[in-house]
Structure formats: structure tokens, C-alpha cells
Image (tube, rainbow, N blue to C red):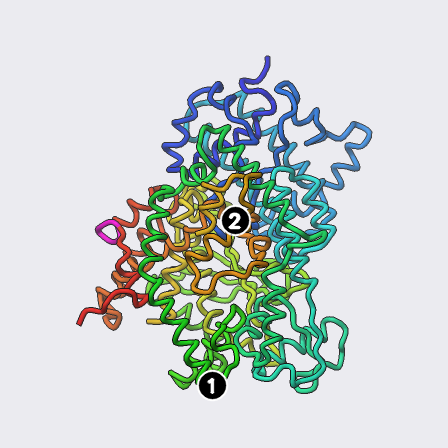
Amino acid sequence: MSPPFPTRSRLELISVIMLLASVASLTHSVARVRSASQIRRLSAETLSKSFSCPLWSSSFTFCLHRPLKSTTSLVARGFCAVPSSTMASSAAESFDSNPLLSDFDFPPFDVVEAKHVQPGIRELLRRLEGDLVELERSVEPTWPKLVEPLERIVDRLQVVWGIVNHLKAVKDSSELRSAIDAVQELEKLSQKFNENVLDATKKFEKLITDKKELEGLPATALGLFAQTAISKGHENASEESGPWIITLDYPSFSAVMQHAQIRTLREEVYRSYIARASDGDLDNTPIIDQILKLRSEKAKLLGYNNFAEVSMSMKMATVQSAENLIEKLRNASWDPAVQDVEDIRKFAAEKGAVEANDLSHWDIGFWSERLRESKFDINEEELRPYFSLPKVMDGLFNLANKLFEINIEPADGLAPVWHSDVKFYCVKDASGNPIAHFYFDPYSRPSEKRGGAWMDEVFARSRVLARDGNLVRLPTAHMVCNQTPPVGGKPSLMTFREVETVFHEFGHALQHMLTKQDEGLVAGIRGIEWDAVELPSQFMENWCYQSMDLELHTKYIPGGPESIYDVDQRIGKRTQVIPPLLEDRFLCSFSHIFGGGYAAGYYSYKWAEVLSADAFSAFEDAGLDNEKAIKETGRRFRETILALGGGKPPLEVFIEFRGREPSPEALLRHNGLLPVAA
């Protein structure tokens, strides 16, 4: 007797369930899948992963090939090849020793190697297909008989694939790239885009032997450059005598932009940064064109006018409302931005800068920092000693205790880690009961770790997948940053921006770890609309203080008269006081929209900033010095924004916390774009 669904649809069924779960509550989503005919009309090629977390750019992607024929099974195509009888014994032994297929409490990050990926993933898919076949044979339309078995299947694939992609992000190697490429086809373009950005960033190295060329740079930057030189083979490099190597890794790049007095050095580094992955073998231009073309075709196949509409179908906003918000913020901020640039120009002129009347992009950061020093008699480097990493983490954990009544304790040794820098923590409630865990990988490692900062899930909270007699499986996350590493035996001394970044990623982690959803498919960050997922992260940034994307996916026509760079220039002239350089190729390294999950969704940061500023204003209304009121407001924030996960639409969750719909007034006020009430 043939199964109720074609063989090729079995793994697509997982995609369907996960896609629907990310739109709304799974309770409602499952009700939409009413018949086999509905599932047959959906194909894997139209169901690429669409999870709502920025930080899922390194996370799970379904390993599905484009179907060749409706009668061709996954097994027949060699996708999940079954070992022959003569090889079964040796294959079984190999699978038994494959850490990706082992039973673990925490992922075996320390022993997974590239050689494990292809056989491990394919064997896992073979097993999961078998589980689906069995489920189809005995399917009953009840939660325990349908949804819970599906959760086990989906979760296992997501956890294992998440391990692989996470290691690629933090311990990249050519062997791991090849192994992933062998089992992943739909995401090859985005994968190649990200690889080109990483390789282009690593390719730039500027060796400096004369300290005069580094005039103005603080000791922390010189120490970082010397440490980089040591890692590149200059064993005797030192902060005082060099040699020094500047890279395009962000801690290095930003130090030059803010502090290097020699303008030609700033210009060289800036031009190299905006030109990453834009020429030669690493040129991302044709990849961008192909990605945009395929997204446009996908939108037409699904009945939409453009890909932005596809993206917005799973978000709070519409294309129009997102554009309206961006335009409102642009109008409110344009005149103050023009004035800011004029203030910088006047200050540079007062200091005798020859570039004062023709400021360029590599001048703004430098002279902004000098103006700030002059106005407030303090500079960012002087703040570093106050922001050592241990002090920042203590402050962050104390704040979490004050707001949400949780305690965070070191748990190093409880779980394997992928690098000696990585710390592991246990989160406990007020009664001392463990409720979550997380990894923290703080430092930049340019040779193997991609840039930026992100949070990702390791395990979601789940009743179905509870172990060892526990009521639920506890959620586990990892936070990854790229801040300045310790230099010369001293702790990592952070810039204020790096402090903000840690608070930001911790906000994401809190939403994942403090969820009270027991259904794993909608627990934590799963199933939350993408433009709402930044709310907790940007909300946490507030405690540190006590638009091109839409255009490319709506109006840009691949192969039309305008190139992607024409669009970039046109929008830049409307939104930047100093327009982009004609040779600016930043799009070639814009991983968020071409190598991650922010296609037609980069506005989400501002959309969520409206939500987060409004949420923080609830604490302002309560009185930031009123400890009792802050605790009560923090409890409501935890019980709504952090606890409800994807089980309820984010607008309803926000209204439940705030008592009304969100308003942009708090964001404008926080940015000094509204008059402060007397």
C-alpha cells in the first residue's frame, strides 16, 4: 500500500509545519494542513527557512534538493542513501562513532569535525524519513499522535544542523565548507556570499613598521595590532615597537576610523572596507544579481508582486507601513543630521584641518570623536577601564536579577565548548531551580570566526523532548560577539559600543531562555515575526544608558536599466548627508540581506526600535529610581514579551504589556528629535 503522500513530500512536510509554525500559533497552523492534497501543492523549493531571528543567519536550513520528478524518491536520488548489505556493518560502526548522531545532553562541539558532516547529516535524514514513513502509516489527527512526533523529527534535524552551521560561523575551514556544500543546495548562493565576505575581510592586511604612521591610536589598538602581527608570524611584535598589522576585522577597522590622525591611512582602510568582496574571484556582484532574480521569480510563482510582499507576509508590518515609518524617521532626523555634520565641519576647521570644507566618510568618525572629547572632556578610550568584560557581565547579570528575578551562575565544564574562550552559564529562577543555559563566545578570531554578533538557539524549551524524568527540556542558547580580545595579560577592555552589543545579544537570549511555552515549535524565539524579534534585544540596550533593502526587493528589476549600485547611490543621496562614494560596494558585504535572513526585512531594526523604546518608556513612566515599581514592570515584561514566544502574535503581546498599541514617540524622544517636556 502506497503512503498517503508522495515520497518526496515527506521532508517537505517538515518544512510545511515549520513554516506554518513561524506564522502563528502552532495550534492554528496545524489546523490549516487539512489534507494530503494541500501538502502536495507545496514544494520544497518555495519553502526555504523563514525563522524570525536575525541571529539565525548561521542556523538551521533545511537540506532539501530541488525535486527532479514527482515519482523520484529522496532515497533513489542518493540523497539519503541506504548502505548496501555488504557495507551495513562498517557503516553502522561509523555512524555509532559519529558525534552528530550520538545521544547528548549538550552538543559535542569539541569533537565534531568536517568528516562527520556529510555522512552524519545524510544518515540522520535517512532515519528521519523512516520516522515520517511510520508516522504516515499510523497518522491520527490529534496533538499527541501528529504534532508531538513531528516536533521530535523537526527538532532533531534542527539541533544537528544548527551544530554544523554554528561551527562554520565560529571555526570556519575549507573542509567544513566542502562538507556543508555537499548536503545543502538551496542555500548555496547565500553561503557563497558569506564565504566571500569572510575571505575578503581576511585578505586585507596592512603591515606597519613605523609607529609615526599610527599617530593618535590608543594603546589598546596598538596592542591589538601587535597581537595580530604575532598571529601572522611576527613573533617579536609588541605594542611599543611593533610591527603592527591592521585588518578589516571590526575592532581593528573602527579603531583606525576613530583615532588615526593620518588621513591617508583612514582613507585606505575605509576604501578597502567598503570594497570587500567586490572584485576578482571574491566578487559578490553576480551572486547578488542571481539572488535578487531568484527571489523575484519565487515571488511571482507564489502569486506576489515582489519578494518584499513575500517577506512581509510573515511580519508585523506591511511594505507600506515599513516605508511610512522609514520616511517619518528620515523627515524627523534629516535637519538634525545636517546640523551635526555642520558642527563637525566647524570644529575641524577650528582645529586647522585641511579637509574641513570637504569632509568625507573617513573623516566623520575621527572628527566626531574629537568633538565629543572637546565637549564632554572624555573619550571612548578613557571609558574602557570602566568596562572590563568581567565587570560588564557582573553588571548585566545583576540587572537581569533586578528586572526578572533570575540568577546567572558560571557552569564551565558542564558542557563541551568549541574554543577555550567560550564560557558556559546556568540560569536559575528565584528559588534556585535551573531554567536555562547559555554559551558566551566574546572575542574576535579573524582567521576562523565570521564578523558581527549574534545569538542562536541550541535547544528550545520542550515538554515533548524532556529527559531524565524532567517536566521540560530546558532551553539553551549561544551568544557570540567579536569584541577586542584581552591584550598583554589584561582583561578585555570594552568600548561602550561593545557593551551595548553584549546587552543586545543578551536580550535575544533572554527571550529564548525565559519562555514559558512548552510546545517546542513555538517556544522562545521560534515563530516570532521577524520585525518583532529585535524588541527584547534593543530594549536591553536602553539599560546601558539609564532603507535600501526594501527598495531592492520592491522596485528593483534584475536585469533592468538600473544596477544594484545605481539603487544604492539613489537612496544614499536621499538618506545620507554625505552621499556614498561612487565606488562604494558595501552591498557586496551586506550579509544581512544577501547571506542572512533580512531580505526585505532590514527595516526590522527600526521597527523593533519603536517597540523597544516604547517598552522601555514603561519603565521610565514607573520611575527608574523606584525599585519596587521597576521590579513590577520587569515582572510584566518577563511574563509577556519574554515568556510568550511564538504562541501569540507580537502585537497582542505588546498590547498586553503596554496596555496600548506601540507609538514612535519614545524613539523620537530618546534620539532628541522631540522637544523634552518641561
> Where is residue 8 shown, x and y percent of the image?
60, 25
Residue 253 marker: none
Q: Which residues are magenta?
A: 656-661
Residue behind mark 2: 593
Q: Nearer the viewer, residue 146 or 231?
A: 231
Q: Is residue 657 magenta?
A: yes
> Where is residue 144 shown, x and y percent of the image?
44, 31
Residue behind mark 1: 351
Q: Nearer the viewer, residue 489 or 539?
A: 539
SS label for mark 1: loop
Q: Is residue 52 above or below residue 142?
A: below
> Where is residue 294 shown, x and y percent of the image?
57, 36
Residue at the location (29% across, 58% down)?
A: 615
Res. 436 in view: yes
Q: Nearer the viewer, residue 517 or 67?
A: 67
Residue at the location (35% across, 43% down)?
A: 320
Please state if 640 lies on the left or on the right of 53 as rendered.
left
Res. 160 in view: no
Contact between marks 2 and 1 (CB within 8 A): the answer is no
SS label for mark 2: helix
Amino acid under disc 1:
Lys
Residue at the location (62% across, 51% down)?
A: 194
